Amino acid sequence: MTQKKYISQFTMMGTVITITLFTPNQPLVEALYDYLAKMDQTFSMNRPDSELMAINRQAGVQPVVVSPTCFDLVQRAVKASQVYSQSFNVLMGPVVKLWRIGFGGQTVPASTQIQRCLALTNPQDLVLDAQAHSVYLTKPGMQLDLGAIAKGYFADQLIERLQQAGVTQAIVNLGGNVKVLGVNPTTDTGLWAVGIQAPKAPRGTPVLQVVTPAKTVVTSGIFERYFRIGSKCYHHILDPQTGYPVANPIEQVSILTDQSEYAEILSTVSFFKGAVAGVRWLNQLPNVEAIFIDRQQHVHVTAGLQHLSEGVYCYE
Ligand code: ADP
Ligand code: MG
């Protein structure tokens, strides 16, 4: 008998979320839905009543006491922003808002405006009080934007909750941020084939696939949110040094590793490094692999990925 799949799909957090199980468990799927709805209430940038918006609204005014979940994610996100200050920065909120890329923005802001916003993105200007569980953006106009990390955290949490419920095999997909649990019951090898949408692939070119044991696959790319002026593409990964979209020939980076939150950070950082320096850097990190695609549609991979056939890579 072929192995059945139980696929649940819903729209939340501005994206499509899919949970695949191999034995039916509707109550568990509903518990995961409720969990994500709660996270959306906590972290949404679009709900005035979210904890994140409360922090942003009180910028320059006072510290805001938040839930342990919110405090911990903000703390890790800020730490990553200090470690990778040249690329990953969750305080880019004012610059993201100024450009409005993917949210109706169609023009390049004045450089004076960009400079003004950039002055509000220093992670040192955010004060965390671990005792009080408070977050304080000390300058008016500062804004946290967890868009480059939150979905990774949610994917990790979903898998953890599935495991706690005794589930041994599952796939969660948060708008292309994929995490897999256990041994694939539908293949002889137990490995999973995770598809990676190749940007602008010519017709008939297969989408890339990685054949892998249970891992997470997270992609940062520039072809979902952008606008064009002439031949120039203005996309949504903004450089904390300049306030402009990162200017390099990379179209997308996919990271394979165990933790989705970490993969989110690495995908953004790797994007800035570019294919050659990015591959060299990632080859030194244990248990991390990556696939870069540049604007010529050339594919660059890290040392642990073996090229099996056209478009198919295998995690060793
Ligand atoms: P995706 O939204 O496709 O998952 P990313 O994970 O790379 O892509 O996150 C991009 C989002 O993160 C942007 O839409 C913006 O909200 C925010 N952002 C933009 N530039 C940066 C940056 N340099 N560091 C951290 N977050 C950023
Ligand atoms: Mg990311």
Image: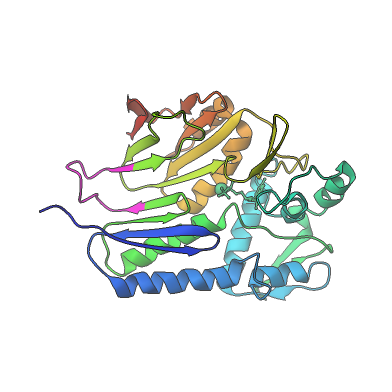
At horizontal 39% and vertical 58% (from top left) the residue drawn is 18
At horizontal 22% and vertical 45% (from top left) the residue drawn is 190
At horizontal 73% and vertical 31% (from top left) the residue drawn is 230
Please identify the quadrant where the C terminus is shown. Answer: top left
Residue sitting nearer the eye, 308 or 160: 308
Question: How was this image coloured?
Answer: rainbow
Q: Position of residue 290 (x, y in %)?
A: 46, 35
Q: Position of residue 232 (x, y in %)?
A: 71, 32
Please identify the quadrant where the N terminus is shown. Answer: bottom left
Q: Position of residue 165 (x, y in %)?
A: 30, 70
Asked if residue 81 lies left or right of residue 179, the reply is right
At horizontal 35% and vertical 52% (from top left) the residue drawn is 180
Residue sitting nearer the eye, 50 or 163: 50
Q: Main secondary structure of the magenta part?
A: loop
Q: Is residue 83 above or below residue 284?
A: below
Residue 46 in sight: yes
Residue 130 in sight: no
Q: Position of residue 225 (x, y in %)?
A: 62, 46
Q: Is residue 105 above or below residue 46?
A: above
Residue 43, image quadrant: bottom right
Asked if residue 285 lies left or right of residue 161, the reply is right
Asked if residue 150 lies left or right of residue 193, the reply is right
Q: Write the start and end of the magenta stretch as one range.
A: 180-193
- Give the residue furthest to the right: 112
Residue 236, image quadrant: top right
Residue sitting nearer the eye, 30 or 191: 30
Is residue 192 shown in magenta?
Answer: yes
Is residue 208 shown in magenta?
Answer: no
Q: Is residue 130 above or below residue 91?
A: below
Residue 295, image quadrant: top right
